[in-house]
Amino acid sequence: MNAVIALCHFCEIHGPRVLFCTQAHHAAEPQHVLDSKGEEYPSTFGHHFHKRPRSSTNESLSSVSSDLTTCSSASSTEHCEACRSFQPGQPGFISNDHEAKISYISSQNPEHPELFTIIRQACIRSLSCENCQGREGPIFFGEDYYGYTLSYMFIIKDTQARGLQRGYSIIVVMMDKIYLLNSWPFLVKHMKSLIDELKSKSNKVYEQEQTQRNQRAERLHREFLSPGDFYRGGVNKPFRALVVLTGDANLFKYLHMRFSWILKAGGNRITEKVLEGPPLEEAVDLDDEEVTEEGFIKVSTKPAVPSSPENPSQSEGHQSEDELEGDEGPVFSSLQHLRAVLGSLNFHDVAYNVLIGNQLIARADCKSTLKSLFKVLKVILPAGCCRIISHSPTYQASWKCNFLGLSTGTELPEHLITSEVYLLLDVISPVNLKQDSNRVVSRTAGPFKGHGISITSSSVVPDKVPTILSRIVTTLNNSDLTPEIVVTVLTTLKEEWMNKVKLLFKFTRAGSHTDEDTEKLLKILQAKVEDKPLLRFWITALSSQYRSHLLTSIMGTT
Amino acid sequence: MSSLEEGSGFGGDERYCVVGSFPQEFHYSQEGHNGEVKVSDSDARPRILLMGLRRSGKSSIQKVVFHKMSPNETLFLESTNKIVKDDINNSSFVQFQIWDFPGQMDFFDPAFDSEMIFGTCEALVYVIDAQDDYMDALAKLHVTVSRAYKVNPNIKFKVFIHKVDGLSDDHKIETQRDIHRRANEDLADAGLECIHLSFYLTSIYDHSIFEAFSKVVQKLIPQLPTLENLLNILISNSGIEKAFLFDVVSKIYIATDSSPVDMQSYELCCDMIDVVIDVSCIYGVEREGDESAYDSESSSIIKLNNSTVLYLKEVNKFLALVCLLREDNFDRQGLIDYNFLCFKKAIEEVFAIREKANGVERGADYAALTSDSLDNTQANGLVATKS
Ligand SMILES: Nc1nc2c(ncn2[C@@H]2O[C@H](COP(=O)(O)OP(=O)(O)OP(=O)(O)O)[C@@H](O)[C@H]2O)c(=O)[nH]1
Ligand SMILES: [Mg+2]
């Protein structure tokens, strides 16, 4: 449980004070979280402690394996017996959970200065600000920035205290409100049982002291004899430590044990998983991995046709110089560029077909043109959906590839034209332009100036296109965005929709469900009817390993 | 994809950056427990702050004066751990809030919202334990006063040199002189001569605390000069020596005539109120729906063997007039009674104006008040024909 548990005390001299605090340190915890200026010394699982500069040198650390930090407080001189759990120089406590690689560490105050501030404020608030009905019991307070606190206030009897009792509280501080509130029954139950123990111990001491000398009578009597003298002279030592009040010398060790247990059991009790629980597909499917520029791991596909000269993965990133040699055709540099050349309407058609998995057949004079076209368009599809043959002498079937590059003039088979769904994009060089009739001529300056663009499609683009296409168009319409930013935006967009795809996949495979249920899920995912073709296609992006992983892994409860 | 186990957490996460201070409303919010309407109402009330080092006797003062706690019981008061706000509204004349602070209160704590605390307060009572070494207390007094003054220069500063019951008379005077001198020197050194501190010697074991608190509360009553004037007219026309207008419940006097107050006569009057309340508690006829031992019929005459008469008359639900007069002047009791009725009427008029001013919010109070005064018109008429 990522929480800090602390015992706080309202000292009659110093006001609210943190007495004792336990926290868990994880092996995996990133190191940067602590400021790097401090002196470091490794002592626990991968965790580094910082010794804050202290004025007194005798507080230096001993090398005992169990110790970590001396009782830390910026103002240790200001502590009296009642608000101290460790004597100055005395080490704290540590328990190591070797299996989970977690260390539970107890000290007077948290070592980390910012955490210290948070705990201290929670302590002040718990003892000096918040009102609890009947003074004893649990309350909850906090806000996002400073964290949330579950505070259990209680009273310990003390014959020497002014009101014959003293106020304490146990606080659990967490950044995660939902987690903390969900842990309420558990935490309160165990805090209460611990507090009841403390109280019954201290009650015994109290009763015993009262029978020896009735404080009430005593005080009234004294006041009668010498008014006002009661607290003076230090005879009574009115500020006694909790150890004395409970008559338990090992009290803090015991508290360490109980607090650590609460942290551990509290952590085991609820495992939190984000709703988009499945890991990145790429994290599971590590075959043929290759990290792309965006930091994704690219899943390569087997070349569908042996004759195909290049491996699709090579079309990514840096093209080898030799491939471009002798082929100096115009290239598309970015999606924006492509859109400018095609015109936004044509681009819209192309993108639509690509997104829902219709085969895109491109014909151009130069291989480099084709290659750059696919490279640019790939960005809008998940890696697993891209099966590219960037150049083939003959037509290749759509089950082999959804991006197909052909030389200008290559014939398409009859069955394709009559019965399949495809989109044909011709990039016609100015030389051949005259013979062509239904073409758009690119007028924008650049490598494609004067080229003709022709689009033939067997499908009609509906009025309502997938949400993601509208978002792509909006992104591209924003002329302030550089191509790099566009790629980043599209990558996140893809990731967002891939998560929906994963959820949908898992849902559809996870046993019986009605169509109605599916509709509900789609609604939750904010997927509309027009998104369905896209979802259907994108599911194919999930590799078989990933699918089996998804189906076997258990979705955690939240 | 972070699960809680994996996520980085309390070891120090960016989320912890910049922990400056509490949000403003956090520490000293004005949450009332009685619902919202009440809150705004009580917030509008004048506020008296009780400050001072721990164990100086702040909570004791508040309990003894306003909650009838016996002084011995204060031995078992717990140290105050949060600001305790107490609404004093038994009399419609004296309505205010007392804020009892924990002695450990640190002004330099970012949580301390001095604007909010001093901004709308009327009076600050600083309690010094005279039986203890008071050097620290003086230092804190200086910090408190200068801080409060900066926020709100209209605050009236009252210093209670407290627990003087343990001091001999000589020692008392000496202590007061010393504290007075040092406190003013500190202020002068800081260039704050403009701040005026009033000093009182107090103890919960006698009436001095009531007297001192009376002075504090009187300053909260804007009608004070009118009331004093009325009392002056009353005593000069009735042969009365000294007259106090008391808040019956707390026994603090909210006004007196302009002749000097001596402690003994004040104590006598306090004791008289106790006697009247006690006697009518025990022997009073219990009327339906009215358990209070004090009502419009309440009045009492006590003749002392030094030929002095104590005369108590009810003014309204919460206020009583207690007069001291020589026995030979008391043979004209009719005149005194008549004058008293005039006085009472005048007080009611003062009330009426005030109620009109706060009209809307305190509608209920006002209604209660008018019915009260209707009861009394009959009596008024009677005496008038007699004259
Ligand atoms: N002799 C004497 N003792 C007093 C007087 N007033 C208060 N005390 C005693 O002083 C002690 C402390 O009183 P509190 O009223 O609790 O002190 P406080 O200022 O509220 O203290 P904190 O709440 O800690 O700030 C109690 O034991 C009282 O009995 C007094 O006038 N005379
Ligand atoms: Mg107090």
Image: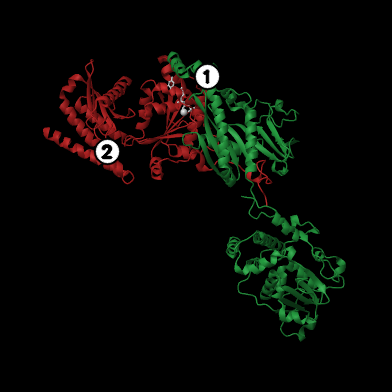
Chain colours: A green, B red
- Image quarter of residue B204: top left
- Image quarter of residue A303: bottom right
B127 to the left or right of A318: left
Letter of the chain that mark 2 sits on in the rendering: B
Is residue B282 or residue A246 the one in the foreground? A246
Q: What is the C-alpha distance between the residues marked 2 and 1?
A: 60 Å
Q: Which residue is mark 1?
A: A208
Q: Amino acid at mark 2?
A: Val
B144 to the left or right of A508: left
- The vertical placement of A350 against B320, above or below, is below
Residue B312 at least partly seen: yes
Residue at 78% across / 69% down in the picture?
Answer: A388
Residue B18 image position (x, y, % from top left): 62, 43
Residue B23 image position (x, y, % from top left): 54, 43
* Dot 1 alpha-carbon crowd within 10 angstroms: few under 14, some 14 to 19, many 20 or more: few
Looking at mark 2, is its residue's CB closer than 8 Å to ligand 1? no
Residue A184 image position (x, y, % from top left): 56, 42
Secondary structure beneath label 2: helix
Q: Which residue is mark 2?
A: B350
Q: Which mark is residue A242?
A: none
- In which quadrant of the rendered image does the C terminus of chain B lie? top left
Secondary structure beneath label 1: helix
Is residue A488 or residue A403 the one in the foreground? A403
Closer to us: mark 2 or mark 1? 1
Report if the CB atoms under discs 2 and 1 are less than 8 Å apart: no
Q: Amino acid at mark 1?
A: Gln
- The vertical placement of B79 against A552, above or below, is above
* Dot 2 alpha-carbon crowd within 10 angstroms: few under 14, some 14 to 19, many 20 or more: some
A21 to the left or right of B251: right
